[in-house]
Amino acid sequence: MSDNDNDSVDRTIIYHQGDNVNDNLQIHHDDFTIRIQNKMQYSGAVLIFMGIIVLTMKASVIEVLLVLLVTGIHSNKETAKKVKRPKLAVPQINCDVKAGKIINPEFMVKCPTGCQDPKYHVYGTGVYASYSSVCGAAVHSGVLDNSGGKILVRKVAGQSGYKGSYSNGVQSLSLPRWRESFIILESKSQKGVTYPSTLTYSSSKTAAAKAGETTRAYEKPSIPGTTTQPVTLTQALAIPVAETTHRATSKPFAAASATSSLRPQPAGHRSQEMEEMDEWKSGPVLLDSGFVPKEELSTQSSEPVSQGDPNCKIDLSFLIDGSSSIGKRRFQIQKQFLVDVVQALEVGPAGPLVGVVQYGDNPATQFNLKTHMNSQDLKTAIEKITQRGGLSNVGRAISFVTKNFFSKANGNRGGAPNVAVVMVDGWPTDKVEEASRVARESGINVFFITIEGAAEREKQHVVEPSFASKAVCRTNGFYSFNVQSWLSLHKTVQPLVKRVCDTDRLACSKTCLNSADIGFVIDGSSSVGTSNFRTVLQFVANLSKEFEISDTDTRIGAVQYTYEQRLEFGFDKYNSKPDILSAIRRVGYWSGGTSTGAAIQYALEQLFKKSKPNKRKVMILITDGRSYDDVRIPAMAAYQKGVITYAVGIAWAAQDELEVIATHPAKDHSFFVDEFDNLYKVVPRIIQNICTEFNSQPRN
């Protein structure tokens, strides 16, 4: 076909479409025919293509190819619209994973329910230190509620001065400095940003391994007929299951010793424990889940990583059972329990400090309060403890702790409550009552954890069947834990931590020497004289020296009287022993008559009216003669106001009047010396009576 004939060409399109997919489509153009065979029905794109062929017959081959390319792209877009994008896989973490454990700079995670009270705390507000629980921070910030859900986490630079606050049911804590921070955002992914479906942790463990750590502290032993669970607790769980079902050895029995006892194994003991194993559930994650390794704890400054939990500032001694009867496996479970407790406590210089004493035949300090100042170092030290063996001489261990452990040289801080947690496998092989009484009187809050205690038929072998109630600080149940099986010991971790940190309820922190408001009512009448008055002041000073004096411990006040009365200093005037002793020396002799009744009434109104509600009110009245006024009514008023009155008479004092003034029984609260120079002799008796009365109060 020539160019001249183009305009006259008869263009004919013949379109044939049959009934089946193998029909042909033909396009005739005089001297050529386009035939398209298709194995399926023709699409709109093909028809468009055919139209283009007819309308652009004069176009160049390049133009046709361009049209084909555009058509193909459009077709591909239509196909792509029909393909669904895969959903973003969001990794799930547990409540206590810390941001510092995750290397990814920005990531999306899913938190489970119940993260309002994570084991690992939250530090900061808005911007959180990477030492914090990710999910705990999400709840605190309000991005996530306690029902769980997805959150977006973005790492930012570290900072100084993370401020604590209470928000959305979570108490965040302050922190001086941390090298890395993070912020929590809503879980809306940003356009064009791809978030990792698998998190990268700072240890060699995979994300799958981290998910499995939620039950790492203890694993269920293998029982015939059940599915075997993986076991990860080293050494302890390497011992065959058969050893978990019975005591390694019974309590040693010394025929010549009245303080030792035998613990026989009752019939059916093994099968009972096997049943307990079948019902046993995995314990809490306190061993390693979300815990920052030691190198992660380093900061850019010399400041401590964490000062500890200031709401739990206690000096704590664990007395662990290292006797032969406990066996290797139970001893290992006991050590794991200690690890769980110290990691839950958040140990630090401004919080709890922990030491360990192991007892068998004799006690020995494994490490004291100042040896390890953080939970990670304590964990390492606990894991290195080896069993001592021998008897279960608990009483001897308590005496050792009372005399040696809570000293300044061993890290005792004075202002922090002293707490001793005694762990006993079965029962002690010696007496604990007297040793525990001395411990209580020394201000030690004794807790007892008895594991697999004596059954009724076994109590005949126990030296003191009710040893726990005789030993603990109070018999109200707050200080005692009875654990039926070693396999359920892990359930005691959180209840124990909660109780030892409840410092308001640590009743034995109060002793006869640190819990009173003591008011001296001093006779300054003419019959005393200047020289003897100085002797009386020395007597007052000698008594004051015996007490622990501060604004939170024992406080001292003084009134001098003749016919009139004068407040020398009140309870809130001086709060240290040197200041009190100086104030006593400065009291000037007044001289005058002897109105003792009016002086008692004055002391009640001007001195004891300002006594603290939680203090024992003690009045010590010193006189050398009979009163000019009546003392009965004021003495009764003192009794009704809860004031314990001690009456000290000298020389011409009337003993019958002293007995009226003194609190009942008078023989314990009234004293008489024939001359002033003998006053020093009654100082020990008064102190002893004050403490005896204090310690005789009901312990419930």
Image (cartoon, grey):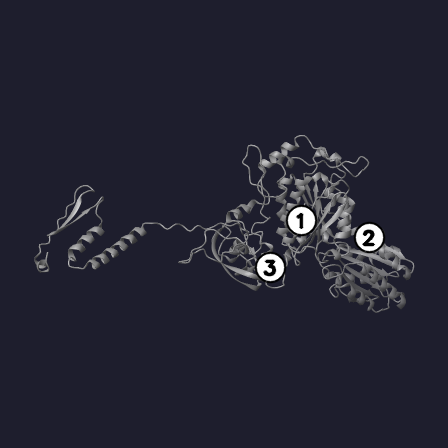
Q: Dot 3: within a 10 Å radius of its alpha carbon, few (fewer than 14), some, or many (20 or more) residues? A: some
Q: In the rendered structure, which disc, 2 or 3, sits on the residue that comes first in sequence?
A: 3
Residue at mark 2: 689
Q: Residue furthest top?
A: 267
Q: Is residue 409 left or right of residue 522?
A: left
Residue at mark 1: 382
Q: Is residue 78 left or right of residue 61?
A: right
Q: Nearer the viewer, residue 444 or 621?
A: 444
Given this view, does label 2 or label 3 mark the residue nearer the observer? 3
Percent x, y of residue 380: 65, 51
Q: Amino acid at mark 3?
A: Ser
Q: Are marks 3 and 1 in contact (CB under 8 Å)?
A: no
Q: Nearer the viewer, residue 15 or 118?
A: 15
Q: Is residue 243 above or below residue 301?
A: above
Q: Is residue 117 above or below residue 566?
A: above
Measured in 3D between alpha carbons, the distance from the residue under mark 3 to the one under mark 1, in whole angstroms, is 22 Å
Q: Dot 1: within a 10 Å radius of its alpha carbon, few (fewer than 14), some, or many (20 or more) residues? A: some
